[in-house]
Amino acid sequence: MNAAIRTVEVGGAQPYRIAIGPGLLDDGAMLAAHVRGRHVLVVSDTHVAPLYAQRVAVALQEQSTQAQVMVTCLAAGEASKTLDSFAELMRELADFGATRDACVFALGGGVIGDLAGFAAACWMRGIDVVQLPTTLLAMVDSSVGGKTAVDLAQGKNLVGAFHPPRAVFADTSTLRTLPERELRAGLAEVVKYGAIRDVDFLDWLDVHVDALLAKDDAALAEAIARSCAHKAAIVERDPFEHGERALLNFGHTFGHAIETEQGYGGLNHGEAVAIGMVLAARLSTALGLATADDADRLRALLARFGLPTALPTGLDADALLARMRLDKKAAASGLRFVLWDGAGAARVVSGVPDAAVLDVLRAG
């Protein structure tokens, strides 16, 4: 394997490898090593397919000479993550005559990873899927861990399955075509891993801000590899989200409330989570769990990555609190948050009083 390629092993009942580095989408031999049958479906979207789908299909076909390789393209964006799109993929697989040894390649961001993964989980009760994430957010989060889903009108990710991939290939060269705002959104999730588990990683990120924003391959590969290693360790211990995996939601209770209150038309997910992490750190300080210095340091790092760290104007604290109650179905004893005892030491805290949350929200 190319020395520039980093790997992370994900253990558990269905182990797989994450490969990280430039040029992976053109490595037909590496990709085709996971093709077991005669049918290969590359699923992408209208943003990513024009850039990379044909390259991937050609690389696979050259190495999988006995297989048929077909590309299908869905509309880009969260609005496509529906049962209708899922049904479309089911029809594609049926028309293709895909057998139980078929393989789906999910080429795109988190929406495509979720949709294609869910289709693979359901076709003939489960066929192989290989994740080819093309956004930083997907590389460090949604492509790892085997969670697949589609949205309903009633809420996000309500229909889905746990379906680990056979492999993940995070080609860092695809990030060169990623809009700056999306890169920064992904970096919020990268910072999260340092915040919840690894203070040394926060130190490393502080030193490498400029290289990461410049899309330096080596710096990106290191950040992705360290993030994936942390997620892999958590997922291996808690594959079905019964306990420790909740720590991955640091900043998300606040963040989801912000996104929902804005009608998904304001901040993107990473931006909302950045603000959410700062608010969670400040709430931790208010409850006497951590020092204000830790919260200030986190805010400063996120700001250096060009991420927002304060609530947008016009958001009402009481409305946000109501969203959090609904989101978490809180008990009478109070809300449940992922907080920290300081940088690198997150934990779940139940029974957080409303008054403390409102004070943090009103302070912005």
Image: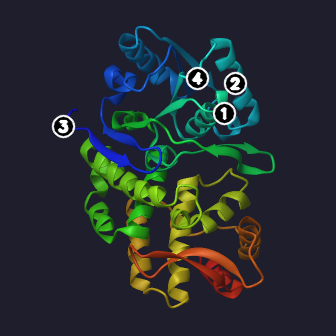
In the displayed structure image, the side of residue 349 where residue 341 appears, left or right: left
Nearer to us: label 3 or label 1:
1
Given this view, does label 2 or label 3 mark the residue nearer the observer? 2
The residue indicated by pointer 4 is: 100
- Mark 2, Cα crowd under 10 Å, few <14 / some 14-19 / many 20+, is some
User: Residue 88 bears which disc, if any?
Assistant: none
| Residue matched to label 2 | 90
User: Tag 2's secondary structure?
Assistant: helix
Q: Is label 4 in a helix, a strand or a loop?
A: loop
What residue appears at the point 53 percent right and 62 percent down from the top-left corner?
245
Q: Earlier in the sequence, mark 2 or mark 4?
A: 2
Q: Residue furthest front?
A: 13
Q: Amino acid at mark 1?
A: Cys
Spot the residue most to the left.
Answer: 3
Q: Nearer the viewer, mark 4 or mark 1?
A: 4
Q: Is residue 222 left or right of residue 53?
A: left
Q: Given the current orientation, which residue lies at the most extreme bottom position?
A: 288
Percent coordinates x, y for residue 276 in the rendering: 56, 68
- Residue 214 visible to the viewer: no
- Callout 2, which amino acid? Met
Q: Which residue is mark 1?
A: 122
Q: Kindly indicate whether the residue at mark 1 contacts the one at mark 3 (C-beta within 8 angstroms).
A: no
Screen quadrant of the N terminus: top left
SS for dot 1: helix
Q: Earlier in the sequence, mark 2 or mark 3?
A: 3
Q: Is residue 234 left or right of residue 211?
A: right
Residue at which label 3 appears:
3
Tag 4: amino acid: Arg
**Up-down: is 105 above or below 266?**
above
